[in-house]
Image (cartoon, grey):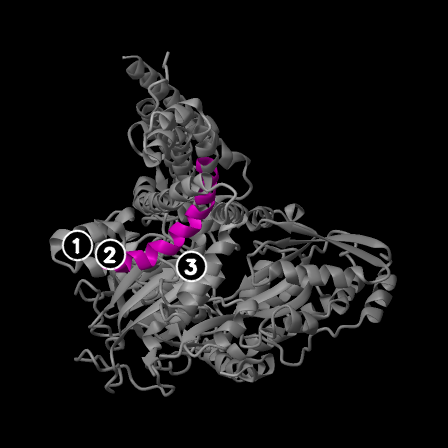
């Protein structure tokens, strides 16, 4: 693949088309429209999922060559319990063995999981119809009671564990199993319920969970997913074997080895040597090494993570909207993307990314205009301000370098001086998560992944008054979110969120930076396309 | 008898040291920023969820209660439960120990095999090209950072020459041993193991090799200048016997000490090498545990490393008595 094949413009185009698909899918997620079937491996069409009877057939009945495959991540799991974690590396591993009621396609659209139909029966009640013939890896059939138990285990503290995913399914009040269906009741409307269930809520077998201890559950799997763990070496490697009776049909991948290397050069070396087929997070400085090789290629995709500098509304000089806007004009975002990220990022001007429900296509990123920035600083009354930008170290791709560039560009304004303070992420997070706005830094770099593809899932936690991580108290933003969360009609809701994004663009509580790209190295022996949401699905890989 | 009393005394001292390690690593969690809750819960988790997780982890208990509970559990052989990994900390730690020991021993073997002959050669051919070469090698070995050397070795011998594996521990020494009686092709297994272990062992052992080479060279030079060597030569002993039976044996006394101490260091000090080679040992577990604030796993790892260091020190003392009869214990 040539360098031109993967430049930012190409991916912006891809993102644009993906956005349209996802926006439609997001709208379909309320159950008012017919759900889309899951795409099959190596196939962009949407055939009906059909169980296979042979080792060499995919779900659509086509002959597919079976092969073994290795994925190298940057970090291994924190145990194999799919409901007792809250990070992507673990989710990537456990999702090979566990299915949710709903799933997502490569662009983030909602598709079938082990629920074949879903609908909103009342404003606060939804119903999932379960697919017939789904079995767990141990051969037992999936029941509605298993699904109900799984949801309860996540959201209720008195069912086994205090799950870190407790808030990920919304305010569930009760779960009622029925005949081949499960009804979930919420406290209130929950307008994005299907988006939440498409990203969260993997299903476990009640009897298996209750019969086995935490230690066992974290080292073994028994889901309904396409792979089952054959061996588990904590922190080192999980070897999966394909599940022959998976409802989508047996995967083309026979044995899936999942390992990790924290060093990026080690990951790249593995892919160049053919020791791995997919590797995550190829950093900009390693990209040419992969591209120039005969054995592998680069596969970048816009992720669901936005990077920004947040400014606390109650601390001078960030109390001034002019000053906050000035910070946006002072940062040369395009230069940072080109020079620091080697083009693998997309500029933003609102908290909602392009593929998400509620993204406002009319908003452009702030242009780089230092003169305008200096004028706005003068207008704000805070000329001569001295500010400090705090940044985590190594948490996000090139975070320190990006923060250095931003701080330097702000410092170059004649009437503002800006220093950079690097902080270990755990230390920074400690300040961000206390629940008190006064504990938070006045000005810091942060990234936010939004696997639900919905504007509210970014704006509410980060910018609404009662958000867990908020740095803003603004009645208008709160009103927008209250309206959005009480509106069931997807078009009407999307319009509200778009208005909110336009308002927040002008309000400028952040210096809007970029959409982070996920950059994968992929062996030339396989065909595989990455997903937007950082989830790796080896099920869809085929031999070239 | 004197040796027995001495070793008993050292064991008791070692217990105190390990208790100190336990106390320090337990205390570290309270002065280190960051909470395991942040590694478990998403950033936007509610305060209610955070409190529920804290209760589940026992983090809402007073400090002294947690400490007494922890030490009590340790005395029963329980290192605690890794709430991050959802597993017993002892299981995690002891599953990683063999990989670290394998790498440490392999690095030590590499060091011994190269450094002692090179040091002897360098001393016996002083101011000759081989001496200059050995000195240059030692200087380079001591000055080269592990991470750089590891990456360079991989680029040359794995990526370019395709001789060794880039990383991982696909075959371990246990596989080689079991191949002897399971009927697996022994030679193939051995070669496969060597493709995994060679580069990390060289990377980890290079500094050590350089150190021992210099130590051996200076020790040999010192011994060869002693009067007992002149006497041995004067009475007509062959030079080989003088060098390798008399001078080298005395040279090895400080070398054994350094070897032992270094082995202890290697057990806990292979963090960078393990990271470069994705070697699944204690070093990797320590780093992961720090990043995730997985205190039970971290404490368990550090206690095992500390205890390992103490044990190696005691063994060195015992070996020292064997190598050097002049040692007097009181």
In terms of secondary structure, where does tag 2 sit? helix
Q: Is residue A186 left or right of residue A502?
A: left
Disc number at residue B179? 1
Taking depth in this image into account, of A501 and B149 the one nearest to the observer is B149
The residue at which mark 3 appears reads as A261
Which marked residue is nearer to the observer: mark 1 or mark 3? 1
What's the residue at 21%, 68% (across, down)? Answer: A135
**Residue A438, x across and y down, in percent:** 67, 46
| Image: A134 above or below A461 | below
The residue at which mark 2 appears reads as B190
Q: Mark 2 or mark 1: name the one nearer the start of the chain.
A: 1
**Residue B324, x across and y down, in percent:** 35, 23
**Residue A151, x across and y down, in percent:** 34, 59
Circle 2: is it few (<14), some (14-19), or many (20+) Cα within 10 Å?
A: some
Q: Are marks 1 and 3 on the same chain?
A: no
Q: From where the camera sits, is residue A407 visible? A: yes
Q: Tell which subunit mark 1 falls on.
A: B
Q: Can you say which quadrant of the picture contains the N terminus of chain B?
A: top left
Q: Are the residues tagged 2 and 3 within 8 Å (C-beta)?
A: no
Q: Are the residues tagged 2 and 1 within 8 Å (C-beta)?
A: yes
Q: Can you say which quadrant of the picture contains the C terminus of chain B?
A: top left
Tell me the distance, in whole angstroms, between the alpha carbons under discs 1 and 3: 28 Å
Q: Is residue A368 left or right of residue A201?
A: right
Q: From where the camera sits, is residue A163 visible? A: no
**Residue B210, x across and y down, in percent:** 47, 44
Q: Which residues are magenta?
A: B189-216
């Amino acid at each position: 693949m040539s360098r031109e094949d993967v430049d930012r413009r190409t991916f912006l185009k891809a993102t644009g088309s993906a956005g349209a698909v996802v926006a439609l899918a997001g709208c379909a997620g309320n159950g008012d429209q017919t759900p889309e079937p899951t795409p099959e491996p190596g196939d962009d069409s949407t055939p009906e999922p059909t169980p296979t009877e042979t080792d060499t057939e995919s779900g659509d009945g086509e002959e597919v060559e079976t092969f073994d495959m290795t994925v190298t991540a940057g970090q291994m799991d924190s145990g194999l319990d799919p409901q007792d974690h809250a990070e992507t590396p673990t989710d990537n591993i456990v999702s090979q063995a566990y299915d949710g009621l709903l799933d997502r396609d490569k662009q983030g659209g909602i598709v079938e999981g082990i629920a074949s139909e879903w609908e909103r029966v009342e404003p606060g009640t939804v119903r999932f119809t379960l697919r017939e013939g789904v079995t767990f890896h141990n051969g037992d059939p999936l029941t509605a009671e298993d699904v109900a138990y799984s949801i309860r285990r996540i959201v209720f503290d008195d069912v086994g564990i205090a799950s870190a995913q407790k808030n990920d399914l919304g305010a569930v009040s009760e779960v009622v199993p029925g005949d081949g269906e499960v009804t979930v009741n919420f406290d209130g409307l929950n307008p994005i319920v299907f988006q939440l269930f498409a990203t969260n809520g993997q299903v476990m077998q009640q009897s298996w969970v209750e019969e086995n201890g935490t230690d066992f559950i974290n080292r073994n799997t028994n889901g309904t997913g396409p792979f089952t763990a054959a061996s588990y070496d904590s922190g080192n490697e999980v070897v999966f074997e394909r599940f022959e009776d998976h409802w989508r049909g047996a995967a083309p991948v026979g044995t899936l080895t999942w390992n990790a290397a924290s060093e990026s050069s080690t990951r790249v070396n593995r892919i160049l040597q053919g020791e791995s087929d997919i590797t995550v997070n190829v950093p900009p400085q390693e990209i040419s090494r992969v591209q120039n090789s005969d054995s592998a290629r680069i596969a970048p995709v816009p992720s669901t993570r936005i990077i920004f500098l947040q400014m606390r509304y109650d601390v001078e000089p960030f109390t001034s909207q002019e000053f906050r806007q000035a910070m946006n004009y002072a940062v040369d975002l395009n230069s940072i993307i080109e020079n620091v990220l080697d083009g693998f990022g997309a500029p933003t001007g609102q908290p909602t990314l392009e593929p998400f429900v509620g993204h406002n296509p009319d908003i452009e990123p702030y242009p780089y205009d230092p003169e305008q920035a200096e004028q706005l600083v003068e207008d704000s009354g805070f000329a001569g301000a001295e500010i400090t930008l705090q940044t985590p170290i190594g948490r996000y791709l090139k975070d320190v370098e990006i923060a250095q560039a931003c701080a330097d560009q702000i410092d170059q304004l004649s009437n503002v001086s800006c220093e950079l303070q690097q902080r270990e992420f755990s230390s920074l997070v400690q300040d961000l998560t206390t629940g008190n706005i006064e504990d938070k830094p006045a000005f810091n770099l942060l990234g936010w992944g939004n696997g639900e593809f919905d504007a509210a899932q970014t704006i509410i936690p980060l910018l609404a008054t009662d958000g867990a991580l908020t740095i803003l108290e603004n009645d208008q933003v709160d009103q927008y979110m209250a309206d959005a969360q009480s509106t069931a009609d997807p078009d009407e809701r999307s319009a509200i969120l778009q208005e909110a994004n336009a308002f927040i663009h002008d309000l400028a509580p952040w210096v809007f930076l970029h959409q982070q790209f996920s950059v994968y190295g992929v062996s030339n022996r396989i065909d595989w396309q990455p997903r937007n949401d950082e989830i790796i699905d080896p099920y869809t890989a085929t031999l070239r | 008898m004197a040796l027995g009393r001495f070793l008993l005394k050292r064991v008791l001292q070692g217990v105190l040291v390990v208790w100190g390690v336990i106390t320090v690593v337990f205390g570290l969690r309270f002065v280190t920023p960051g909470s395991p809750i942040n590694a478990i819960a998403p950033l936007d988790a509610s305060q209610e969820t955070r409190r529920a997780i804290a209760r589940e982890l026992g983090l809402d208990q007073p400090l002294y209660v947690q400490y007494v509970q922890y030490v009590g559990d340790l005395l029963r052989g329980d290192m605690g439960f890794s709430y991050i990994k959802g597993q017993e900390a002892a299981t995690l730690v002891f599953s990683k120990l063999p990989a670290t020991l394998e790498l440490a021993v392999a690095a030590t073997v590499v060091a011994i095999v190269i450094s002692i002959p090179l040091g002897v050669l360098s001393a016996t051919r002083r101011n000759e090209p081989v001496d200059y070469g050995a000195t240059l090698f030692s200087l380079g070995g001591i000055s080269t950072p592990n991470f750089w050397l590891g990456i360079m070795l991989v680029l040359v011998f794995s990526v370019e020459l395709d001789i060794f594996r880039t990383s991982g521990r696909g075959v371990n020494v246990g596989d080689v041993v079991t191949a002897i009686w399971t009927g697996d092709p022994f030679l193939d297994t051995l070669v496969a193991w060597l493709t995994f272990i060679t580069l990390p062992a060289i990377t980890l052992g290079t500094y050590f090799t350089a150190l021992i080479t210099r130590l051996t060279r200076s020790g040999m030079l010192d011994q060869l200048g002693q009067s007992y060597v002149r006497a041995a030569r004067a009475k007509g002993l062959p030079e080989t016997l003088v060098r390798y039976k008399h001078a080298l044996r005395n040279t090895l006394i400080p070398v054994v000490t350094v070897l032992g101490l270094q082995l202890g260091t290697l057990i806990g000090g292979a963090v960078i090498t393990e990271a470069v080679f994705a070697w699944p040992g204690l070093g990797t577990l320590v780093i992961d545990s720090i990043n995730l604030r997985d205190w039970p796993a971290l404490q368990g790892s550090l206690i095992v490393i500390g205890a390992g260091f103490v044990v190696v020190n005691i063994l060195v003392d015992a070996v020292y008595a064997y190598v050097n009869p002049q040692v007097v214990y009181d």
